[in-house]
Amino acid sequence: QVQLQESGPGLVKPSETLSLTCAVSGFSISSNYYWGWIRQPPGKGLEWIGSFFHGRGTYYNPSLKSRVTILQDTSKNQLSLKLSSVTAADTAVYYCVALNFYVVFWGQGTPVTASS
Amino acid sequence: QSALTQPRSVSGSPGQSVTISCSGTSSDVGGYDYVSWYQQHPDKAPRVMIYDVTKRPSGVPDRFSGSRSGSTASLTISGLKAEDEADYYCSSYADSYTWVFGGGTKLTVL
């Protein structure tokens, strides 16, 4: 059974950097899927943030590309998300996901609020 | 990269059929056979209902079906049940190893 568990601060100050980690169990992030992040602002729709396929590349939503970094740690079977210069518009539930051209596995999601 | 276009809401009575549309471009919906649909109940993570335009994962009732014409995909739910009331999102793989979502459609079962 594949499990994705997000963790990180639930509150980030405006202009600072949002940092989240996703621990993956039951499947290696080095194989078969694109791994990445999707977010959902309160009462709004889903937005793909970015994904990587191990050994190929990391790809980002063009609208967020200048502020986003997604890293993979194969030794811990984890991925991380960093989003810089956050504003209130970055307040959302952030989901860690595994994709095979569609989202195969979802984490439970972690809410993050950007507020002073 | 622009969001795919979905109606904000649809409704139907139990037993009826409803169709939700999802309009994109030749760079996403019309260009790849990778359209997927997700059901989301309040405060829950989304669940895939259709992938690769027409395929249903195991466990999804055959009342749910997907199709596509040109750059517009559709999700049809037949034999509506109260439990189908939820938000539905379409998504497509797009150019340059990216993904795009629709704005979501709220389905109300009357």
Image (cartoon, rainbow, N blue to C red):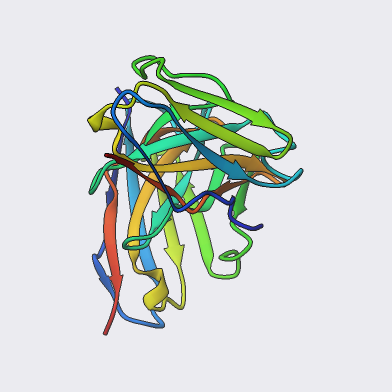
Front residue of B40 and A97? B40
Residue positioned 46% across, 78% down in the render: A85
Quarter of the figure with the C terminus of chain B: top left
Measured from the top left, where is residue A25 in percent x and y? 31, 31
Front residue of B105 and A108? B105
As drawn, is B83 to the left or to the right of A29?
left
Quarter of the figure with the N terminus of chain B: bottom right
Residue positioned 57% across, 37% down in the render: A54
Measured from the top left, where is residue A1 in percent x and y? 29, 22
As drawn, is B48 to the left or to the right of B93?
left
Rendered position, A40 above or below B45: below
Q: Quadrant of residue B11?
A: top left
Measured from the top left, where is residue A114 in percent x and y? 32, 75
Residue positioned 37% across, 19% down in the render: B60
Residue positioned 27% across, 54% down in the render: A110
Q: Quadrant of residue B69?
A: top right
As drawn, is B14 to the left or to the right of B101?
left
Measured from the top left, where is residue A68 in percent x and y? 52, 64
Query: How many marks do you count on the picture?
Result: 0
Front residue of B84 and A107? B84
Q: Quadrant of residue A41?
A: bottom left
Rendered position, B29 above or below B49: below
As drawn, is B100 to the left or to the right of A85?
right
Rendered position, A29 above or below B43: above
Front residue of A81 and B42? B42
